[in-house]
Image (cartoon, rainbow, N blue to C red):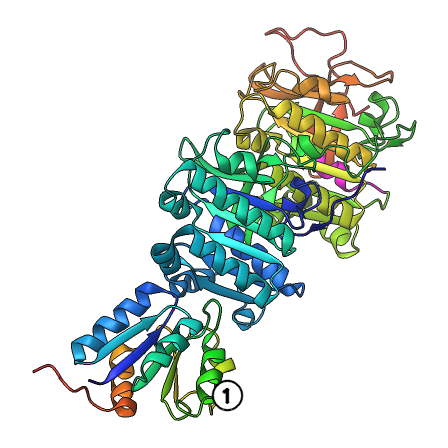
Amino acid sequence: MTTILVVDDEFLISDLLANALEDQGYRVTQAYHGRKALEVLAQETPALVVTDFMMPLMNGLELARAIRGNAHWQHLPIILLSGAQGSIAREHPSLFNEVFDKPFPVRQLLARIQDLAGPPDDPPP
Amino acid sequence: MPQTLQRFTSGIEGLDQIMGGGFVADSTYIIHGHPGSGKTILGNQIAFHRASQGDTVLYVTLLAESHERLFAFLSTLNFFDPPRLGQRINYVSAFSIMDNEGLDGVIRLLRREIPRQGATLLVLDGLLNAREKAASAFDMKKFIAELQSNAVFTNCTALLLTSARFEESSPEYTMVDGIIELREEELGVRSIRRLRVRKSRGSSALSGLHQYEIRQAGLVTYPRLESVSGATYPADDPTSERTSSGIAEVDRLLGGGLPSGSTTLLIGPSGVGKTSWGLHYLTPDSPEPALHFGFYESPQRLQLKASALGRDLSGLRAQGSLWIEWRSPVERLVDAVAIDLLAIVEKRGIKRLFLDGLQALENSITTPRRFGAFLSVLFNELRARGVTTLATLEMGDLFDTTPHLSSPDTLSIADNIVLMRLVERDGRIHRVFSVVKVRDSAFDPVLHDFEITDHGIRIYNRLLGRAFTPSFSVPNDDPV
């Protein structure tokens, strides 16, 4: 089943996005900071990572660097959800496949996720 | 020898003065206030100020509210500087960690995150949620103790924001180094915000309540004037010099003019001519910097009034020896007005002040019987700056003989008093005045009448030896 890893310290955003992805037919795993995300990645490799920027212990930029620096995950699609830090992220185009500024249009985000991760195994009727 | 504690500034106007020079570094403070009192603004304002000074700030929320909503709200305030986000200021949510791992999880997060980011300021927003998560008062005490020890060991000052009410015996109150309380009170149709430093360990904060406002610049606090009296200026140094009232005959009655550096109350009913007297005071022959600070007449109206009296304000304003400042008479914070006035006096080097409409200040006083103490300190501050002040105070009724004051000591704090009255006799109104008091000086107390003409105020001495009786009539004497 196509799995998306959502990484965000703010549970409201993380849960909303997870629900939207599950409604599309994706399987979702969640982590509330970068370090936790690396622990999840060590267990299973998702089809795509959606990450926030500002998070405790390891931020989105550090997480993306860690993913790109690992031979197993270096081609893993990463989407950054950024507040005011979009410009910082855009200075590192090789780290992120896409950057969405918050508040982001959910439909566009879901469409981009489908482009990069492929369609869900079990799409809604 | 006593040690001096290291402090850092908050960047909030007035607050550092109230705090005795700023926040003590590596200490833990609670900022307490009801929702809407401005504590989140205060925490963020300090965070952005410290970031602008090169510090790194960690802003941790224990709230369910998203950071994006917070940023959207902060973006309406001047201090919000998005490029600092993710650089000098990092906002992280510890809500999920607290939910899943409890308060121990939050402490573990802070222990790792503060040194990782090199943060010297921690703002923890939502202490109430931590209290609700704590299983017992002991757990809360342990949480505060760990936050506090963390602040000391990591050289990171902690500001804990909470809307919780707590008693003086609570762990929060007893353990932290300082407590700042923000409160909003309703007075009639007005809402007044006040700030109080309830606890300030190892530091002398200004006691009592201080007013504050939330403006586009963020929080602006106004130290209560009485609490800062004499802090920046020594007591006045009385001299025997005199300052002209702008009317030669009045100077003679005063014993040579207004004593320099003194305060004079011009008391009278509406329409008697107090502002006209003030315009003479502002336009003498001497070039001393003068200020009209008033509440009722706009600069344009004042200009027209002066022209009608044959006094030239525009010339003096153009040459930079006269300034006119007009403030709304309603919804004022008196301490804000006093700070505003004293700042202008200092900036312009004002020596001659006409303060027109003390009743506007009196009406703005929100604490009963405070006006006398406030005015006393304001006059002292003006004296200490070498300002000779003429201030008007209105009587409640056109034909009153005594002013109605909320503080009975108002009259005793002025150095000099001139009483103006309207008298109805023989089918017309007469304007009369007398010098009632000139501190430490002889003066002429004789009642005089005066007229306001297109050449200015003309003083007459047509009342000497005459009683005000219904048969009294005013002769056509020449001016004295």
Residue that numbered label 1 is attached to: A92
Identity, as a three-letter code, of the amino acid under mark 1: His
Give the residues in magenta: B278-285
Q: Position of residue B238 (x, y in %)?
A: 88, 27
Q: Which element carries disc 1, helix, strand or loop?
A: loop
Q: Is B362 above or below relative to B78? A: above
Q: Quadrant of the N terminus of chain B?
A: top right
Q: Chain of mark 1?
A: A
Q: Position of residue B230 (x, y in %)?
A: 77, 33
Q: Residues within 10 Å of mark 1 (few under 14, many from 20)?
A: few
Q: Is residue B332 visible?
A: no
Q: Is B111 above or below relative to B303? A: below
Q: Position of residue B431 (x, y in %)?
A: 65, 22
Q: Is residue A90 left or right of residue B445?
A: left
Q: Is residue B222 visible?
A: yes
Residue closer to the observer: B222 or B431: B222
> In the picture, residue B476 is in which quadrant?
top right
Q: Residue furthest right?
A: B240
Q: Residue furthest front?
A: A43
